[in-house]
Image: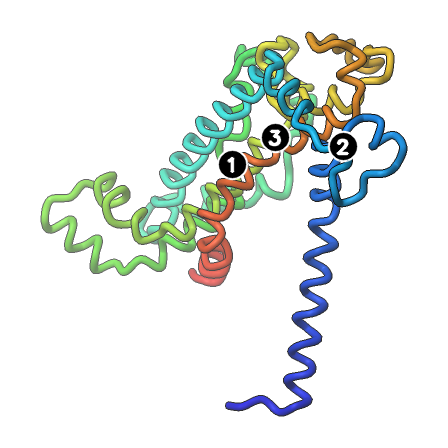
Amino acid sequence: MRLTKGEQIVSALNYIFLGLFALLALAPFVHVLAQSLSSHQAITSGRVSLWPVDFSFEAYSRVLSEQEFLRSFQISVLRTVVGTVVNVVLTCLLAYPLSKAFIKGRSVIMFLVVFSMMFGGGMIPTFLIVKETGLLNTFWAYIIPGAVSAFNVIIIKNFFQSVPAELEESAKIDGGSNLGILFRIVIPLSMPAIATITLFHAVGHWNSFFDTVLYVTDRKLFPLQVYLRELVMFNQSGIDNNSGYSANLDSTLLALESLKAAALIASTVPILIVYPFLQKYFVKGIMLGSVKG
């Protein structure tokens, strides 16, 4: 149906407003990118806005050659990959039986899953559990305490319920096991939902820093977000008054705004690279997983 002239004008105005909002959302990122490619003098004098001044890659070469940055980057990548795999696998293993109405005790388990979304043990009890299980100052303190998300379990359970039962019955007739049916039939058909929770978990692991503050004191296990937090808080004297941070970079260089901006951009790029590959599944997975069942 052809739009009237008034409807065309309204549609054009909507696109213009959306474009303006998109530019506003990108402006801070572009500003930080411009700072990372500018000199310290240009930044402190206020000459840098959305375009680099005194263009230079020196800040990136300094940051990317810093051993503490590289170690923190490796920890974040390892945490994101391992944590996301553990999260997705355990979520699917829990959601699949909960999607079957004939499973005894299903309603009780589902009630406990939903209950955990509304009420938590609290920070101190959680810390005591992590301590008693020997997870303090270990890499697994990042993975095990949050291995299963109740919200994502509900999304995947609802999606699994939409898979035709006839497919599973046919697979059972052919001798398929429950795990075989799950990994060969159900999960491939549920990729939009799987991709959605994968994105949730990956972004959560990549951005997380508070569990490091609670459970880890060994600097060799610090993820990138903690490194950035201390880098941003680093003052002109090269001493972090809050955490006692002492970097290998020269204190004068580390105080430069261009170095801070370069570190922020370097930490943002990996998750930006991953997101476009999962974006097409994002809305579809959320909508189908929330309305079915």
**What element does badge 1 sit on?**
helix
Q: Which amino acid type is marked by label 3? A: Ser
List the single residue furthest toward the left: 174
Q: Quadrant of the C terminus?
A: bottom left
Q: Which amino acid type is marked by label 1? A: Ala
Q: Is residue 112 visible?
A: no
Q: Which amino acid type is marked by label 2? A: Asp
Front residue of 218 and 275: 275
**What element does badge 2 sit on?**
loop
- Residue 114 located left or right of residue 106: right
Instruction: State the residue position of label 2.
Output: 54
Front residue of 268 and 182: 268
Asked if the residue at tag 1 contacts the one at tag 2, i.e. Cβ–Cβ closer than 8 Å, the answer is no
Query: On screen, 9 above or below 129?
Result: below
Front position among marks 3 and 1? 3
Front position among marks 2 and 3? 2
Front position among marks 2 and 1? 2
Assess disc 2: are there few (<14), some (14-19) or many (≥20) residues with their C-alpha within 10 Å of its C-alpha: few
Q: Name the residue: 69% across, 24% down.
A: 59
Q: What's the mark number on residue 267?
A: 3
Q: Name the residue: 68% across, 63% down.
A: 19
Q: What's the mark number on residue 202?
A: 1
Asked if the residue at tag 3 contacts the one at tag 2, i.e. Cβ–Cβ closer than 8 Å, the answer is no
Q: Is residue 265 visible?
A: yes
Expressed as whole percent of the image width and height from the top left, the position of residue 277 reads 44, 47
